[in-house]
Image: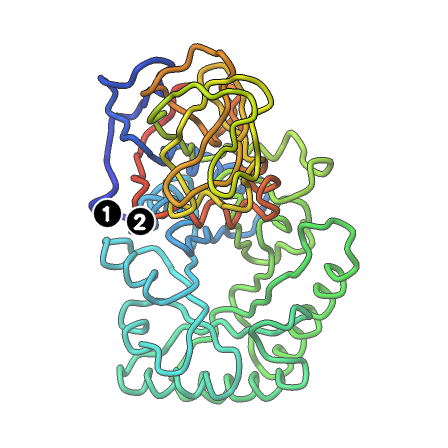
Amino acid sequence: MSTAAHERELPSTLSIPDGNTSSSPVPQRSALIDLDAISQNIVTIRRLAGSALVMAVLKADGYGHGLVPAAQAALRGGADYLGTAVLEEAFELRRAGITAPIFSWLSAPGSDYEGAIREDIDVAAYDVPQLAEICRAAGKVRRPAKIHLKIDTGMWRGGATAEQWPMLCSAARRAQADGLIEVTGIWSHLASADEPGNPSLFEQLAAFRVALAVAMDHGIRPKLRHIANSAATLNCPEAHFDMVRPGLAVYGVNPLPQQYQTAQMQLRPAMTLCASVAHVKPAPAGAAVSYGGTERTTTPTNLAIIPLGYADGVMRSASSRGPVQIGDGRYRVIGRICMDQFIVPIGQDPIVAGQQAILFGPGDRGEPHVQEWADAAGTIPYEILTRIGSRVPRVYGQPER
């Protein structure tokens, strides 16, 4: 979505006005993206990662921030590698002229491995049949494929089981000897790194070390061993190995529980989600608000209509709970969130149509954090950020601080 028509380049500083927005360049609804925050988050991550390389994970359109702009910002901050879930994302980065190393890890049979090899994109092999398909593509292209072999260390998602791992290593050694592949990496994924002290973290790290030893016994000596996601990057140095793979942290959100966050983890949220108030109207006490009348006003109040809804990624499960800031006031959603809009009771506060309502942002002006919306919706910040829809323009610049 990087350079799609719905995105707009604006000056480096964007104003989020307190009054009428008739002269503001900010659209009626927008996700303001601070690319400098992404760059600075990478700087912070690099410091915490020590000697390990940093792969900035860009899946799901850069966690909703825009694939190509987020990639460019991460590279400006010093990212060594870029990571995508699917090849289509990796191809888009190459079409945008990005030449940095890219690893793409989620492919089904029939994927365009030939294209990946031609575009110098690293791919993953989870088992022997997948490795064989990649080798056939490499033979057609007449270039070795760069492969990261995946071991399942206990998450039971993608990757070879401990029983399958020796066979995969043996097949990879033969393919490498035949010049069809280069085993660039060995990797896995942690299930509970955002729960410090969870025994599974240490069990998975131990299983990963065993898998590395098995690979070495089979003559596989990759340059990159990697298992650390954002949480492990921030809080588990023993998981860093040769490279870390932060995702959420790149965009300024710390996945660790609050008590484990430290001053060294200086991450800045890069997205501010806001919209202009569309309408303000008075309502009496006892008014049944929105679909189903699930909530009534308790006193006479004015109601502000905000033109964002679940079609834009504002989750319906946050109905009657989602926090909003308008001017200096904090409010919450009343009643159900609709497809295109929701409602907040503002009492008798002097709010008018055209003022900016901020759902979440970096917090410089006391606005809610994305974690508050995740809590309200009963989900995680990852889902909130990646659900922001395509009709919400991504506006690149810095919100006024």
For the residues labelled 1 and 2, the Cα–Cα distance comes to 7 Å
Query: Image height check: is 56 above or below 363?
Result: below
Instruction: State whether residue 142 is above or below residue 76.
Output: below
> Which quarter of the rendered picture does the C terminus lie within?
top left
Q: Is residue 138 above or below residue 204?
A: below
> The residue under label 2 is which amino acid type?
Val
Q: Nearer the viewer, residue 125 or 237?
A: 125
Tag in front: 1 or 2: 1
Q: Classify mark 1: residues with Cα within 10 Å, few (<14), some (14-19) or many (20+).
A: some
Q: Earlier in the sequence, mark 1 or mark 2?
A: 1
Residue at image position (43%, 10%) is: 350
Image-based side of 98 in relation to 149, left or right: left
Using the image as rendered, state which of residue 89 and residue 296 is in the foreground: 296
Query: Residue 118: which numbered mark, if any?
Result: none
Q: Position of residue 180 (x, y in %)?
A: 38, 84
Question: Residue 311 in the image: x percent, y percent?
Answer: 38, 48
Q: Quadrant of residue 266?
A: top right
Q: Is residue 84 left or right of residue 264?
A: left
Placement of 339 over or under 121, stated as above or below: above
Name the kind of residue labelled 1 in the image.
Thr
Q: Residue at x 36, y 25 (%)?
A: 277
User: In the rendering, at what x and y percent does residue 191 appear?
Assistant: 66, 61
Question: Residue at the spot x=69%, y=36% of the render?
Answer: 258
In the rendering, at what x and y percent does residue 294 appear? Answer: 56, 39
Q: Secondary structure at mark 1?
A: loop
* Residue under the point 31% across and 74% down: 117
Q: Which mark is residue 68?
A: 2
Location of residue 270 by image quarter: top left
Q: Residues within 10 Å of mark 2 (few under 14, many from 20)?
A: many
Secondary element under disc 2, as helix, strand or loop, is helix
Q: Where does label 1 land, which residue?
A: 3
